[in-house]
Image: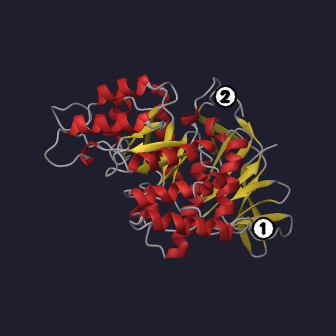
Amino acid sequence: MTDHETTAQAAPGEQPRGDQRTPALGDVTTTTVVHRSTRRPTSWWQHAVVLQVRGETDLPGLEALAAEISHVARLGADAIEVHCPGLDPGAEPARGVVEEFVRRAHQRGIKVLVALAGTDAPPQTDAAAWHLARCTAWLHRGIDGIDLISASRPVPPLGPHAHAGIELGALHALIAEHGEDVILTGGGTARDRAALASHLHEDWLHITRDDRLVVTPWRPEPLRATITDAYALRDPVGAPAGWTLATAALAAPAEWGDLAHAALRRRHDAAAALMLALPGTAYLHLGEAVGVRQDGDVAAAVRATAAAVAAQKGRPDTGFERYRRGLRLRDELRLGTGPVGWVDSPAGTLAFLNREVLVLVNLGPGTVVVPAEREILHASADLPAPAGGEVSVPADTTVWLAVS
């Protein structure tokens, strides 16, 4: 889809199925373009998929990551992010482990980001000086960026945002010394739109992710509004959208309702397939694709994730292969730098075009059908076999359909 096209091969309709009428995707509709495709050359971080390691990574955890980095490469993520406040990367024994971890990641084409907050500084120290020195030590080990984790809400007279223990200007200068591909990132919450907007306009981070996909009710209208708002906030300042499902990965968000574990997992996977189809930068968590939860022990979580990858690899019905296919298609079809054009769709669904892909999310309680002749490129869950010239898309399922 070009920036000016408003017609697509998809539309809502109703088709009889016995005594019931099942919502069905029809033939022709119009779209509302809310984000233009990127036509100029882009940097890796503008459309990356970042795998975050939750919690604090100690030396055994970093050694495990270095040893098992291949599972990240197999999934197809562009970068891995760790939070290691207790490690001094310039001093032994951490130095050798850090250098090996960075070397092995880069060898497999994976960027390394390090999360480091000013509040990580030890008590009774100059937090800003400690933070800057620690960032310098990490950058000297060849990493590709620093993540500030999250900014606090504005507190007068500190300005739009307070970054406790961080000299943002000095950090910008430090990042600039290491080349255009080294980045500074962070997070905010979409619950406070004004604070997020000031964060985007004042802090000048390469990527600012927010939690809007999981603090928004699981319904078409509010999701459409919040995704539109993400681009409305970022496009004027040239910042890529930053998407995360962190809240859903930790626990069921209140906005999603009270769900049993299996239902939550299905909805989470549908949201992940939606997220991966959106332009911008997407964040996943270690173990998310294979159903491994991380509960503090990073080394144990890494080993469990590697074992799950080995068990699920090559089996099309597994979470690993579904996520892997989604990441591969996102890259091949250039969805990370594409446009977003909303498409009219059946009640209870959300649909948009990104380049030559129609993304359909069934958020309602019932089934939606699409013509069997439409090529389904990707689905967040297994779909029933076609019947009567139609393919049924169950509730809490996202599908990517070829437009041409």
In the shown orientation, is residue 310 left or right of residue 233?
right
Q: Is residue 11 above or below residue 304?
A: above
- 144 vs 153, left or right, is right
Task: Specify the quadrant that holds the C terminus.
Answer: top right
Residue at image point 65% right, 36% down: 338
The amino acid type of the residue labelled 2 equals: Asp
Q: Nearer the viewer, residue 16 or 192?
A: 192
352 up-or-down from 46: above or below: below
Asked if labels 2 and 1 touch by Cβ distance under 8 angstroms, the answer is no
Instruction: Label 1: state its secondary structure.
Output: strand
In this view, the residue in front, 30 or 230, is 230
Figure check: 250 above or below 224? below
Is the N terminus in the top left, top right, bottom left or bottom right quadrant? top right
Can you give x and y, in whole percent of width and height, for residue 248 in the image? Answer: 46, 61
| Residue at position x 51%, y 44% in the image | 102
Q: Where in the figure is residue 260, as x and y percent of width and height?
A: 49, 76
Measure the C-alpha gap from mark 1 to mark 2: 36 Å
